[in-house]
Image (cartoon, rainbow, N blue to C red):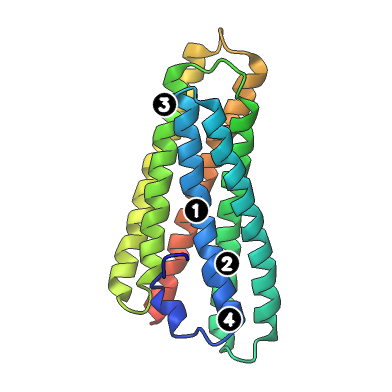
Amino acid sequence: MAEKKSYEWFEQRRKTIGLELAHEQITKAFDTVTLLHKATKCFSEKNFSEAKKYIDNLYNAEEEVDKLRSDTFMELSKGAALISDYREDLLHLVKRLDTLADHTKDAARCLEMLSEAEIPQELSEKTVFMTSKLVETAQTLRSSIEKISAAPNEAIKEAKQVGEIEQAIDKEYLKTKNLFIKYGVNMNCGAMVIFDDLIEFIEQAADMCADTADYIQVLSSRE
């Protein structure tokens, strides 16, 4: 049985199946980030079979996110049990976290395509660092979401922290791209293009966390 999550913002309005579905969708979306980090870590250690297991689990989790998003939208469209503003807020949040899961899935696809490529260890380690910071970003965002109603000031503070972590990821992204000059001569051109896509999807996932955090600040200010 999954650990009970204390999303107090949702607990107050959990009067419809739609809210239950949204709660599960948010949890699954954050799970994809953790699975991506585990996959990149195994990839860096050249444990490709274990990385593939995490990638497959990520794909399954992302499919569940998609289904839950559709089910949530369908349920919330009935709308009888929710005040319109809250329904719209929840839909916006669900959309953003669905996009986050899409970016992590795209990054995982790139990682899978690179399983037989020779990637310099320094680049692999940079990827692991970026995904570790992405996990930190997602965990901080999750904590912020949980505090929207119970502690809105804390929610705003943590939402701002998400933006700060995202900036660190963006800097690491640029540093990693600079390494292409160092390793470009010896890397397969196709592998370099795919690796470039990989780190870009990670950076986009971080951007989506920051975008969601900005939205959380607005929601918290309303409470």
Q: Judge whether 215 appears above or below 223 on screen.
A: above
| Distance in Å between CA atoms under marks 4 and 1 | 24 Å
> In this image, 33 relative to 21: left or right?
left
Give whichever of discs 4 and 1 has the lower sequence position: 1
The kind of secondary structure element at disc 1 is: helix
At x 54%, y 45%, the residue is 204
Give whichever of discs 3 and 1 has the lower sequence position: 1
Contact between labelled residues 4 and 2, with CB atoms less than 8 Å apart = no
| Circle 2 crowding by C-alpha within 10 Å: few under 14, some 14–19, many from 20 | many
| Distance in Å between CA atoms under marks 2 and 4 | 11 Å
Is residue 161 at all visible to an observer of this figure? yes
Position of residue 15 measured from the top left corner of the image (x, y, whole percent): 54, 87
The kind of secondary structure element at disc 2 is: helix
What's the amino acid at mark 1? Answer: Asp
Q: Name the residue under label 3.
A: 125
At x 49%, y 22%, the residue is 46
Q: Name the residue under label 2.
A: 94
